[in-house]
Amino acid sequence: MAQFKWYFEDMVVGQTIPVGSRTVTEDEIHAFAVAFDPQPFHVDKDAAAKSLYGGIIASGWHTCSMMMRLMVDNFLKDAASLGSPGVDEVRWLKPVRAGDTLTVTTTATDARPSGSKPDRGVVSTEWRAVNQHGELVATVKGMGMFLRRDHA
């Protein structure tokens, strides 16, 4: 069986784990929006310039997708993750624009062993994305399930 760096027991409430940075490009903002969220302020420069955003911005769902990619690449691939039972809250606090560099962290806000499945535990987390100016642009609150080390 695979050995992981992160098991349920390693998730300490209050611990913040950096999960990396990513710079968003105009091409990927456009490609994501055309495929999944083609609102004018994501895909049409003229309409976006006249919008309350004053220009093209990334879809909030694109921001969440970038956060997820960083989580997988720099945390979950090394964790005994069993997936997630869901997300409780997503907040898009500031627009994300081409050239912005997002830095993401995850903080454990609660951890409890499963009452029905002794091989795992559930960890509540808050993911935070800040831009290159240190401004909080998005948060995601949810849960993840992780194997317990003594059951791996």
Image: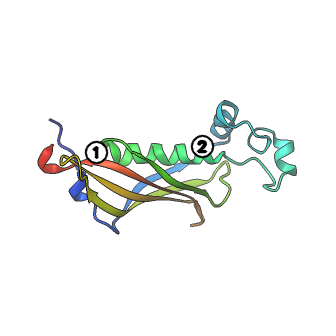
* Amino acid at pointer 2: His
Whole-number angstrom distance, CA of label 2 to CA of label 1: 24 Å
* Amino acid at pointer 1: Asp
Q: Residue furthest top?
A: 35
Q: Nearer the viewer, residue 107 or 74?
A: 107
Q: Which residue is mark 1?
A: 78
Q: In the figure, is residue 149 to the left or right of 82?
A: left
Where does residue 92 sit, x and y in percent of width and height?
Answer: 62, 56
Q: Nearer the viewer, residue 114 or 103?
A: 114
Look at 67% across and 46% down and name the residue there.
58
Q: How many marks?
A: 2
Q: Nearer the viewer, residue 17 or 126?
A: 126
Q: Residue furthest left?
A: 150
Question: Which of the image's four quarters has the N terminus?
Answer: top left
SS at circle 2: helix
Where does residue 50 sit, x and y in percent of width and height?
Answer: 88, 50
Question: Which of the image's four quarters has the C terminus?
Answer: top left
SS at circle 1: helix
Where does residue 40 sit, x and y in percent of width and height?
Answer: 80, 41
Where does residue 90 sit, x and y in percent of width and height?
Answer: 56, 54
Q: In the figure, is residue 86 to the left or right of 17?
A: right
Q: Which mark is residue 62?
A: 2
